[in-house]
């Protein structure tokens, strides 16, 4: 063993003289008395490990004249060699009333001395245990019908909410009451009358944390609370018109049935995402509450589902401020994938030029494109599309726009991607069929909402390139 710390050796000798076996030191008042009240668990553990190492080396040491000094452990005398070796036992420590050697782990009286241990969960009544189990099951299965389950879900997934009623309320309001926030005017404090009360949310948080012992707060959440306060400031600023992102939701159409010569890309351009994000949250909340959970695909819509899709269009139209409905279609015999790459790039450029003409590109911002996931296309062409789009936009708007990587998303994960599917499907149906059955009437309603046939509509970007008749 290397050079021994003199203070450590002195403490070890004191332990041995007191008659306490070093292995059992952490369970004695003697051990606790050698620390400052604020000593951490790691500090105590390191000291215990050092003393235990010193004890182990001393137990196996033998006298050595060559070392020129005394060994910590000495050989028993000749007369004592034939006597049974006495077993070293630790004395009963006054005030504890137990033998720490024979009751090393199970003795309740010594537990308070172990200040670094995890505090045991307090005993709950049978009703509280059942309530606790219900909350855990609801959070695990995302069944959030009750207010208490919603709060527990937020406490579980967002640790920054565990130490602040204000942070918890912000998350609760924005996730579960977005429709109320959407209808409020900027800085309209009367909206608090319609939102869930802060004291109610705070009381349920304390029941979940203090009574049921779930999702306790952490000291490290201070930084997270500061971040959410900054996010709130950004949100309030967004209601005054500050923007930073233009977002596109695209879906493709064509290349099916007998109309394999039709290719189309259509969807929605959100010119001011920070402003529209609260409307997006409200629309998503309405869709989850009012419509079936089955994803919306225009090609799969039957007559029975047309009414609910019309209701979705009505909700979307009520929030069309700041939106561009966009679509490009071509009559093409070319390669399908290359057509889609070109059309997406051209549609983004045309939409950005329209947004610029409307005064929506008055500061540098980012461009984000979200498209429906397509395994075959994405594997072969998404990287190419991403690089070409970035280069083209930066050349057309130098120093003004930065294109983020394109995101491929499964349909059903975002209500605006479902709306993009409806616009793309309605655009094709309107161009190729024009009948009077329910699906054709739905296509008429979609085109009317998008404004594709209104040349004076600034809220639409639409082109359909058809070949000249021979």
Image (cartoon, grey):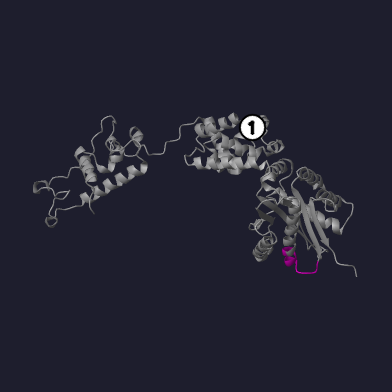
Relative horizontal placement of residue 342, taking residue 456 as reference (left or right): left
- Residue visible at 24% across and 45% down in the picture: 8
Q: Main secondary structure of the magenta part?
A: helix
Q: Nearer the viewer, residue 173 or 49?
A: 173
Q: Determine which residue is flagged by label 1.
A: 196
Q: Nearer the viewer, residue 71 or 220?
A: 220
How far across and down, in percent of the image, does residue 206 sit?
53, 32
Instruction: Describe residue 364's horizontal placement relative to residue 206 as left or right.
Output: right
Numbered-mark total: 1
Res 161 → quadrant: top right
Does the magenta portion include 228? no
- For the C terminus, the image quarter is bottom right
Is residue 134 visible to the viewer in this orientation of the structure?
A: no
Whether residue 29 is visible, yes or no, is yes
Left/right placement of residue 468 relative to residue 154 reads right
| Magenta run includes residue 338 | yes
Please state which of residues 281 and 348 is positioned toward the viewer in this rendering.
348
Q: Position of residue 403 (x, y in %)?
A: 65, 57
The residue range painted magenta reads: 332-341
136 above or below 412?
A: above
Q: Residue at left 57%, top 42%? A: 230
Q: Name the residue at the left extreme.
A: 79
Callout 1 secondary element: loop
Which of the image's four quarters has the N terminus?
bottom left
Determine crowd level at label 1: few under 14, some 14-19, many 20+ residues with C-alpha closer than 10 A. Answer: some
Q: Is residue 318 left or right of residue 228?
A: right
Residue positioned 81% across, 59% down in the render: 463
């Amino acid at each position: 063993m290397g050079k021994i710390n003199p203070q450590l050796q002195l403490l070890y000798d004191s332990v041995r003289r007191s008659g306490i076996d070093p292995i059992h030191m952490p369970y004695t008042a003697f051990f606790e008395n050698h620390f400052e009240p604020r000593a951490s668990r790691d500090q105590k553990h390191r000291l215990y490990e050092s003393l235990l190492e010193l004890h182990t080396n001393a137990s196996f040491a033998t006298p050595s004249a060559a070392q020129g000094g005394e060994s910590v452990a000495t050989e028993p005398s000749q007369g004592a060699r034939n006597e049974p070796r006495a077993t070293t036992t630790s004395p009963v420590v006054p005030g504890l009333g137990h033998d720490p050697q024979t009751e090393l782990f199970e003795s309740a009286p010594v537990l308070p001395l172990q200040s670094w241990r995890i505090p045991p969960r307090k005993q709950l009544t049978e009703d509280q245990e059942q309530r606790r189990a219900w909350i855990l099951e609801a959070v695990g299965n995302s069944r959030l019908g009750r207010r208490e389950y919603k709060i527990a879900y937020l406490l579980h997934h967002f640790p920054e909410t565990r130490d602040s009623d204000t942070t918890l309320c912000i998350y609760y309001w924005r996730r579960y009451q977005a429709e109320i926030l959407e209808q409020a005017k900027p800085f309209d404090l009367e909206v608090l009358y319609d939102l869930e009360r802060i004291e109610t949310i705070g009381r349920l948080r304390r029941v979940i944390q203090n009574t049921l012992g779930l999702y306790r707060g952490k000291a490290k959440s201070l930084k997270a609370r500061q971040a959410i306060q900054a996010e709130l400031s950004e949100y309030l600023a967004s209601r005054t018109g500050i923007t930073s992102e233009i977002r596109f939701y695209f879906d493709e159409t064509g290349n099916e049935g007998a109309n394999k010569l039709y290719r189309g890309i259509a969807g929605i351009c959100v010119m001011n995402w920070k402003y529209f994000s609260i409307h997006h949250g409200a629309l998503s909340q309405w869709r989850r509450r009012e419509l079936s959970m089955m994803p919306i695909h225009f090609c799969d819509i039957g007559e029975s589902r047309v009414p609910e899709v019309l209701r979705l269009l009505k909700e979307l139209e009520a929030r069309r401020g700041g939106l561009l409905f966009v679509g490009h279609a071509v009559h093409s015999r070319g390669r399908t994938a290359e057509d889609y790459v070109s059309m997406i790039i051209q549609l983004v450029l045309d939409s950005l030029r329209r947004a610029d003409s409307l005064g929506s590109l008055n500061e540098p911002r980012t461009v984000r494109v979200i498209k429906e996931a397509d395994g075959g296309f994405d594997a072969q062409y998404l990287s190419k599309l991403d690089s070409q789009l970035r280069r083209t936009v930066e050349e057309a708007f130098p120093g003004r726009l930065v294109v983020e990587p394109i995101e491929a998303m499964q349909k059903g994960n975002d209500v605006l991607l479902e709306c993009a599917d409806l616009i793309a499907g309605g655009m094709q149906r309107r161009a190729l069929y024009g009948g009077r059955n329910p699906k054709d009437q739905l296509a008429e309603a979609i085109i009317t909402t998008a404004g594709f046939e209104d040349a004076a509509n600034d809220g639409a970007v639409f082109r359909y390139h058809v070949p000249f008749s021979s």
